[in-house]
Amino acid sequence: MKWDEFFVTGEPMIYGAMVSIVVASLAILIGLTYFKKWGYLWREWLTTVDHKRIGIMYIISALLMLFRGGVDALLMRAQLAMPENGLLDGQHYNEIFTTHGVIMILFMAMPFIIGLMNVVVPLQIGARDVAFPRLNAVSFWLFFAGAMLFNISFVIGGSPDAGWTAYFPLASLEFSPTVGNNYYSIAIQIAGIGTLMTGVNFIATILKMRAKGMTLMKMPMFTWSVLITCVIILFAFPVLTVALALMMFDRLFGSQFFTMANGGMDMLWANLFWVWGHPEVYIVILPAFGIYSEIISTFSRKNLYGYKSMVWSMVVISLLSFLVWAHHFYTMGHGVMVNGVFSVTTMAIAIPTGVKIFNWLFTMQKGRIEFTTPMLYSLAFIPIFTIGGVTGVMLAMASADYQYHNTMFLVAHFHYVLIPGTVFAVIAGFYYWFPKLFGFRLDERQGKRAFWWIIISFNVTFFPLFFLGLKGMTRRMYTYSESTGFGPLNLLASIGSVGLAIGFILLVYNIYWSFRYAPRDTTGDPWNARTLEWSTHSPVPEYNFAIEPTVKGLDPFWESKKGGHQLYEGKIEEIHMPNNSGQPFILGIIFFFFGFFMVFSWWVPAIIAGIGVVVMLAVRSFERDHGRHIPVKEILETEARLGGEQA
Amino acid sequence: MKKLFPVKHVMGYLFSLILSIVALSVVFFDLSVAAGMSILLVSAVIQMGVQLILFMHIGEDGSKKALYTNIAYALFVGLVTVFGTLFTMIWGYQ
Amino acid sequence: MKLDHTLPLEYRSEENSNRIFGFWLFLGAEIVLFSTLFAVYLTLWNRTGSGPSGHEIFEIGPVMIETFVLLTSSFTIGLFINSMRQGLKKPAMVFFFITLLLGAVFLGVEIMEFVTYVNEGATLQRSAFLSSLFVLLGTHGAHVTLGLLWGIGLMIQIGREGFTLDTANKSFIFSLYWHFLDVVWIFIFSFVYLKGLM
């Protein structure tokens, strides 16, 4: 292989990206050395097993990936703003919509949600950490290795270009000979293993480590949503693992799963992809439902309406989510029976989802609603998500789907579901739980300004796409002629996307400004909230709770504030905590190189890296690490420093 | 001897050998496809039960209910994947 | 550390009982993983292209050996846990050793089977049926291989430390894994080989 095949060449934008990557990396290295922060970075972050810090690292990665995916989106909108625009050529456009999709779903939405899970769930159930802290760090570093591997593809070797769904036969070696889709199959695989481990970890945490008295039906709604989400992760991700492995076999070892000859079945890929892919949609949306439930209840000053129906509707959604996948390829050409069955199951999902929407509305009814930034996002979510849901029911009708299958109508639909459903939710959750992590609130006035920019621009960007789709504009076309008449609405959408970008810049500025100037919160409960996480200090000490809480009912902190029972009984004892470890980080690096060598079919280095992974497993197996104990004296000092007696 | 080879384990082992031989019969007798598949399915499912309950002690864990739910959910998704794929990719074309 | 002495050694600390629980969850994921491979195999099993069909290449002899060996190893790993729970280290080690030995025999027979297939021209690249066959069997075989490495590491640890909270817990989890591989094999035996030869 020659150097000019190894690096992507011939694109001024890519050269710019290469230069900026080198400059940014150098700046980070020099900065760390100059400020003598290497030790701090290693001790406090790279080796940490603390769920709060891992959560923060997930969220920072997600924000970085939001930037990357957002730049992709802006480039696409710039290209489509005018008919016959020449900003991007067809190949470059293909690469950009592919990476936009993969990054936004797998490396932005997923880690953001997993980050919030990490931060919040142990606190909400009154635990001191997750069930397997070391495994949690492994999950993060595998996700991070996968994300970085996927991201370097655009400067080294070329990005995948067959869409985020990577349908065969297009994604096969025959039609996509570059290494792009090798990156796809291997980078997502590595990150996916990390996600699967997260699923195991949080199910075990929630089922085995709740505070005394917290029965399943007394868990906060966000914790419930995370439990259900992790169940879906646990049973959906293995399907992706297999699908990606088969893709890798087809591309690297010449097997015939999805090929066009020798009995291969190209649509089998689409089938497997969506057996995972549809549950995946619920993986990113159910935690969002949980976040909204917490926020709406807190800022309506009422307990959640219809708690049990909320739980049961999530259980039903989780089961149904495994029964609808074929609606993603109604036009494949299978019979009426298949399309009929999947049409019915798909529409059935609207029922439990509708139950939830009404529950939120009834929670607000006669509540004393407080219009904080997180609450604004929650309020905006309800109507916008409903538009997404209703257009989803339209798409669910198989016979009608033939009209708008793979048009911009579909693109508009899933952005109307995923942006209010996931992005608004993680932003709302970020504003809501931020003071718990850092001890101050993000500025409300700036937050609301960003909110209005985002909400209005979102609709300006995506609403026109419904009409473009109905007029016949298909998705993934990189240009169109003026005579199609697609021009004006596309221009409007592109203007909207600039507004969205401004909104996100305002949001980032809000974070920066608040770090410097926002007043500190010393109460630990800035929102007058209801669940256990607000009953400890902000920022949270590493052991979370000096005394393990005892819970009697729903919204325990609210009840105790109203003069109910005491949350913290007993006296402070030594606390057992896990030790930090560098192994997960090293394992992540080895996996990164293993993946990289596999992408380029460099077998000898790949085998060496593979042996490295096995060695790391053996090292862990032979290790005897039983953690450490924090002495009472140290706990008392920490408690005093963070603001006196607890509760 | 009884200490090292408890009756329960020995019985389970013999039972699993017998079940394998029963399954093997489909090769040597000229059975219809439906009959053959039924024999295979029934003997495989019983084998699975023997392993889960006798050898893996699923019933003695403190979180028995969660474990049974876990296995049931996994089997639900597994069966949906197998039969749903066959339904979508093969049977649905006829 | 809080210990509940009414429980078997491997469950005794909270951490250990969480680990067993977590491993069960992981096995749930493994069930789905193998189900997906079966879904692929059952979809592609008669799409043989220009290559041979299962009926032409499967031989009942080696398959019966593999089945017998793996069933027996599942029995001996059960006996290993049984001895462990009675604190009998020596017989436990013998049973563990026999288990791993049988695992190695299984793997040897499977590799020989693969070599035979390849010599007959039935390679991974030949047809969709053969691709799905090799990947299904290979995934199971890779699990067995990993199990062997894991088992050897574990034997060394038990040899050094005896049955402690750590090693008892690891042993029990290993036994779950090994029984699970046996269950998967039963399904391969039934729905790949016997169905193919039917």
Image: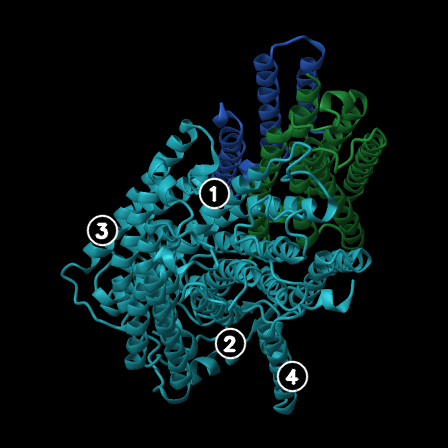
Chain colours: A cyan, B blue, C green
| Pointer 2 with pointer 4, Cβ within 8 A | no
Q: CA distance from mark 4 to mark 3?
A: 52 Å
The C terminus of chain C appears in which quarter of the rendering?
top right
Subunit under mark 1:
B
- Nearest to the eye among marks 4 and 3: give it: 4
Rounded to the nearest angstrom, the CA distance separating label 2 from label 4 is 44 Å
Picture quarter containing residue B82? top right
Identified by mark 4, the residue type is Leu
Reply above or below: C82 against A440. above
Question: Tag 2: Cα neighbours inside 10 Å, few (<14), some, or many (≥20)?
Answer: some
Of badges 4 and 1, the one in the foreground is 4
* Quadrant where the N terminus of chain C is found in the figure: bottom right
Determine the secondary structure under disc 3: helix
Marks 1, 3: nearer the viewer: 3
The disc numbered 4 marks a residue on which chain? A
Same chain, labels 4 and 3: yes
Amino acid, disc 1: Ala
**Which chain letter goes with mark 3?**
A
Residue identifier under label 1: B66
Q: Earlier in the sequence, mark 2 or mark 3?
A: 3
